[in-house]
Image (tube, rainbow, N blue to C red):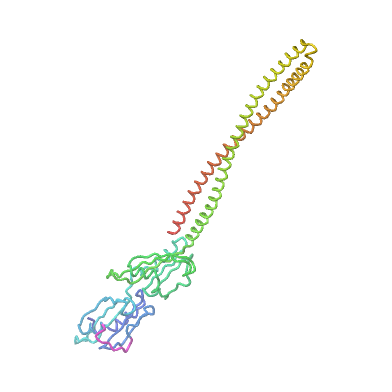
Amino acid sequence: MLDQRAINSCKLLAEVLVDAIPGGAMFWLVEGNTVTWTKSSEKFGIQIVKTGDQLDERYSSIRAMKERTLLLNQSIKRSKQGERLIMSTLPYVDEYDQVQGAFNMAWPRIHPVIAAFGNFAPILAEMYHDGALLYISDLKKVVMRQASSRFDLQSFQLGQNREEDEAARQALSSQSPVILEMGEEKYGVPVTVANYPLFDEENKDEIVAILGIITPKKTAVELRQIAADLEKGLLEISAAVQQLTASAADIHTNEKVQNDKIREVAAHTEEIRGIMALIRKIADATNMLGFNAAIEATRAGKQGNGFGVVAEEIRKLSEQTRSTIPQIQRLTDSIQEKVNQINLKSMNSLQSSQGQAAATEEVTAGIQEISAMAEELNRIALLL
């Protein structure tokens, strides 16, 4: 226990330490059961007692004085003081060893992550490609925040209530990290909110705060839009290619039919050649018959004059027929030549249509592969 003569020295020391302790502190002196002196820093922000308060046994000062016991580094839960505190009470005695009062001190009990927030948060916020907003919630409100130069939410400020926040609610109920996707209706831009519960250093089942990180989904949204546009464009191209494929198939079918017809014409031309050969034979035979008839008519004299006229007409007809055969031959040869040319072009066209159909099928397969990649791109964007 302290000597009463050291109290003034303790007060002087408190004047120095009160603003040097991280998070601030409060010192107070109890004489008997009355608070006679207090000293606290501005950043401490908690009025545990005030000068003139009369204390009872609910206070550690009275218990320590009664039990003549030092109460050092007691952990005070948030539910009692609004903040987690560490409190120490040192009773002091007079020259007769009688307890006269107690010297008290209290300071915030800060979680290590919260204590280091000011050091790591500015660095971590700038490490995200599109920036980030980091914050600490005391389970009720935002008590610390750090935005990056590339991203900030003006609607998300210190003191903002977080009790109704879905991410915080899930993190508290599950006692595990939670990551949620949120649309632009909440903050004006689509974001990802990650909440990590911070547990009491002594009681691992008690959550004392939440570390939150809010990151914009700008890149992911743009990527999803690109993927959607790509998929839409590919669907339109695929539809056009399918129409082209159908047209190519029709062209190929028509070209094949045309090629078959050309082959038929070529076959008919050959048949005409055969018929011309037969006509030539008939013409030769008719000419010979007319020649023989003319000889017989000469032998018959006057009685054969009429028959001679007929024989002459038969020979003329035979000669006309024979003279027509070369013309037909020339026309047939010309037709055959044209048919051969058309057939060659038809074969080339048929092969081209076959190649076009094959190429179209390859294009269709390629588009299907790209469409699959666009779907995968969209899936990956959802994970960002």
Image quarter where the N terminus lies is bottom left
Q: Is residue 108 left or right of residue 215?
A: left
Q: Quadrant of residue 39?
A: bottom left
- Is 23 located above or below residue 369 in the figure? below
Instruction: Residue lying at the far front in this picture: please name it.
Output: 303
Give how far across and how far down residue 323 sits, in percent: 73, 22
Q: Quadrant of residue 211?
A: bottom left
Instruction: Residue lying at the far right in this picture: please name it.
Output: 302
Q: How many marks?
A: 0
Instruction: Residue lying at the far top in this picture: please name it.
Output: 299
Give how far across and how far down residue 379 sits, in percent: 44, 56
Q: Is residue 53 left or right of residue 213?
A: left
Q: Is residue 160 left or right of residue 325?
A: left
- Is 253 located above or below residue 20 in the figure? above
Give how far across and how far down residue 354 sits, in percent: 55, 39
Please name the residue shown 32% across and 74% down the image: 109
Closer to us: 194 or 351: 351
Image quarter where the C terminus lies is bottom left
- Is 113 located above or below residue 97 in the figure? above
Give how far across and how far down residue 223 sits, in percent: 49, 58
Q: Is residue 276 magenta?
A: no
Closer to us: 93 or 108: 108
What stretch of residues is rendered in magenta?
50-59
Main SS class of the magenta portion in the image? loop
Please name the residue shown 70% across and 18% down the image: 286
- Is 351 located above or below residue 96 in the figure? above
Q: Is residue 51 magenta?
A: yes
Q: Is residue 260 left or right of residue 182?
A: right
Closer to us: 171 or 76: 171
